[in-house]
Image (cartoon, grey):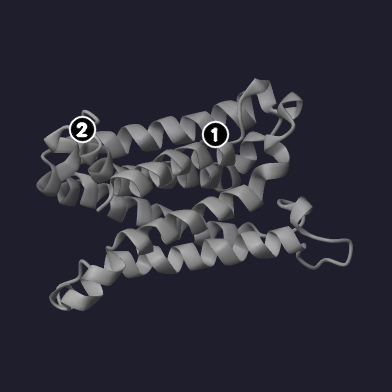
Amino acid sequence: MSDFIEERSGGTGASVIASTLLLSVGYAILRYHIAGDVPWDQFSLFILNKGLCLAAFVLLTFNFALGPGKSLGLPVSASWLGARKAFGMTGFLLILIHALISFMLFSSPYYGKFFGLDGTLTGVASLSMLAGILGFVFLWAYNLSFQTKLSEDQAFIELITSRRVLVWALSLGGLHLAFMGYSGWLKPGDWHGGLPPISLVAFLFFAVGYFLNVLGRE
């Protein structure tokens, strides 16, 4: 993976991706283990999964928003623009890992607020899962557009990389985050160490990427 990133982004992609992963996982450790009361034996899947999710949203935002940001006059370097594909593919892989781990852990002991007394999903949880699944499908299709055979289908490429499709993909990801964590966003007094929830931090990145795409993508 590191060789792939280095080859396509001149080293910028590798350093940005590594820094994003370290900062995101470090923030998860700080918020839940150090400032919070989550036991350390929950790091390997539960807390690590949160950090990977944050890193994925940050990298996907870089992938979708750097071009529009450049069009709007933001100081985006050529090396960052050249690393967009690496950001997007790595973000997609992290989302895939996040989805697999989440399905493994998705139960009332870990996500109690998403289950009713009868053990079924609440309405909000159902909407969050649906938005997440649809958003993942859009990202999957977007990554498929770079495969050799599909890249020759001009109509498919124009559709899947259009502003409308990318904005929809971002919107679904944002809805997944909002439905997943909005109740905690509204209670800053309950934030561990006063640190915002990871879902809120990821949503803020989504919001920036969304508006840059709406305003700057042709």
Above or below for 190 versus 102: above
Q: Decide which of tag 2 and tag 1 comes sooner along the chain.
A: 1
Q: Position of residue 195 (x, y in %)?
A: 61, 25
- Label 2 SS: loop
- Label 1 SS: helix
8 left or right, relative to 126:
left
Give me the residue at 19% from left, 44% from top: 83
Given residues 12 and 61, the one toward you in this image is 61
Distance from label 2 to label 1 (Cα)?
28 Å
Circle 2 residue: 76
Quarter of image, res 193? top right
Q: Position of residue 75 (x, y in %)?
A: 21, 28
Above or below for 118 versus 33: below
Q: Position of residue 127 (x, y in %)?
A: 65, 63
Give me the residue at 30% from left, 68% from top: 160
Circle 1 residue: 28
Assess disc 1: are there few (<14), some (14-19) or many (≥20) residues with their C-alpha within 10 Å of its C-alpha.
many
Q: Position of residue 4 (x, y in %)?
A: 17, 52
